[in-house]
Amino acid sequence: MSQLTEIIQKRFDGFLHTNSLWKNNTFYGLKQFHLKQKYIKFNTAINEKLRLGKYVERFVSYQLEQDNSIEIIAENVQIQKEKRTLGEIDCILLKHKKPIHLEIVYKFYLYDDSIGITEVDHFIGPNRKDTLLEKLQKLKTKQLPLLFSKACESYLESLAIDSSLITQEVYFKAQIFIPFNKKHLKLKTLNGDCISGFYIHQKELTLFVDCKFYIPIKKDWLLQPHTNVNWLNYDTFLSECTVYMNRNFSPMVWIKSSKGELHKYFVVWW
């Protein structure tokens, strides 16, 4: 197995082991799509130039192909009106011969209870540019309704699919990070199994002066931390981390304690 093939498999494994953001079938009016959890060897080509979201969509496509009850009808369909793109439908598939419009979401969210009043309100992206609430609203009001738009009618007809028979589901996986000073936080609404690590502010790094550090590239945010990386000492890491902070970018960091324990963190600039 080549080094790149091994890395891709680890990313795929990390994707597979990421939990759905909610456990119940329906949340916020959105139905969660479920697949049986099992080990799968990723055995196809993937474009390493893809952004993380599209990269994960390739993982989902491959996972769907391994399920004998599923037939993929269409993927990444651009819906246009008068040469203007209205949006994209991630996937249309048959599961047990029943049509499903599937939207795919893979997110990293940090818990900040200074935002909003509900648990859903509290989740933001690492750089504070997006929120969970905004994503849920976009799915409900824009992405899923696109299927029933006038512009989509002819496309569904070309597939010989009756839109009235299609169910709509979302495959929503997420990694959640909670404040380091709230380690025992329990989620009441969302799936607590999504908690993947902690986040800290730059000033809190002094608590980790005896640790080793590694800053993975974004595609490797999917991975579980492992030891086979080039670890940085505190001073070198602090210098590299400052570059990220100055760009208002919150890096993911693997931290190895003096006892050899591995943890996943975000260091936030805000």
Image (spheres, rainbow, N blue to C red):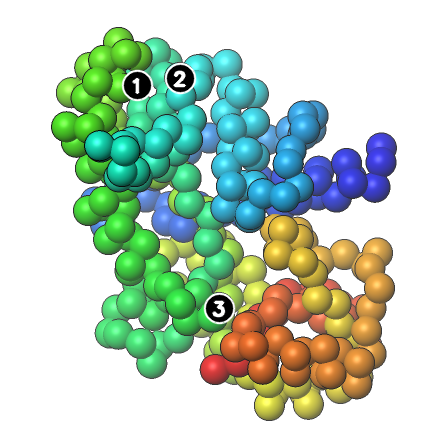
Measure the C-alpha gap from mark 1 to mark 3: 35 Å
**CB contact under 8 Å: marks 2 and 1:** yes
Q: Position of residue 197 (x, y in %)?
A: 57, 65
Please tell me which of labels 3 and 2 falls first in the chain.
2
In this rendering, position of residue 121 left or right of residue 172: left
Please tell me which of labels 1 and 3 falls first in the chain.
1
Could you classify mark 2 by the number of other residues whose Cα lies within 10 Å: few (under 14), some (14-19), or many (20 or more)? few
Observer-nearest residue: 209 or 90? 90
Q: How many marks?
A: 3
Measure the C-alpha gap from mark 3 to mark 2: 35 Å
Q: Which residue is mark 1?
A: 99
Residue type marked 3? Pro
Could you classify mark 3 by the number of other residues whose Cα lies within 10 Å: few (under 14), some (14-19), or many (20 or more)? many
Q: Is residue 12 visible?
A: yes
Residue type marked 2? Ile
Q: Of the numbered discs in the image, which one, if any, rests on residue 73?
A: 2
In this view, 110 is above or below 65: below
Q: Nearer the viewer, mark 2 or mark 1?
A: 2
